Amino acid sequence: FNAQNLANTAWAYATVDRSDALLFVALARATDHRMVEFKSQELANTAWAFAKADWSDTNVCGIG
């Protein structure tokens, strides 16, 4: 996935109130590796999706 695909996938799942743990972990890791590719809108959509799904870096690290 490129940055737009990652943002769109996160946004789509959050919009329908789907918070699949494995998906959001994978999205977080992929987003981290491609952060420099994100445009401001893609970054905003991704951040919103993670907030809406109640996901943070503590979820990804297994702390939350």
Image (spheres, rainbow, N blue to C red):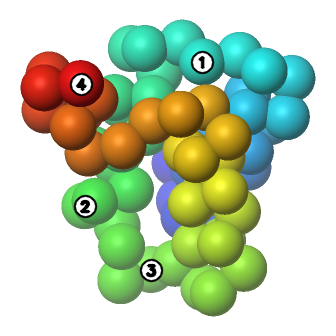
Q: Residue at x 60, y 85 (%)?
A: 39
User: Mark 1 highlights which residue?
Assistant: 19
Where residue 49 sits: x, y (%)?
Answer: 66, 46
- For residue 15, which quarter of the picture? top right
Measured as percent of width and height from the top left, residue 1 is found at 52, 48
64 relative position to 5: left or right: left
Give SS at disc 3. Answer: helix
- Dot 2 falls on a residue whose secondary structure is helix
Looking at the rendered structure, the kind of residue marked 4 is: Gly
Select label 2 or label 4 by which is in front. 4
Disc sitting over residue 37 in the figure: 3
- Gap in Å between the C-alphas at discs 2 and 3? 9 Å
Amino acid under disc 1: Ser
Along the horizontal axis of the image, is 41 left or right of 38? Answer: right
Q: Amino acid at mark 2?
A: His
- Name the residue nearer the viewer: 19 or 10: 19
Residue that label 4 marks: 64
In the image, residue 52 above or below residue 38: above
Q: Residue at x 67, y 40 (%)?
A: 52
Please state which of residues 57 and 13 is positioned toward the viewer in this rendering.
Answer: 57
Residue ID for mark 2: 33
Position above or below: 32 against 19: below
- How far from the left and from the top, in percent, is residue 16? 86, 23
Density class for disc 2 (Cα within 10 Å; few <14, some 14-19, many ≥20) is few
The answer to whether the residue labelled 3 contacts the one labelled 4, judged by CB atoms less than 8 Å apart, is: no
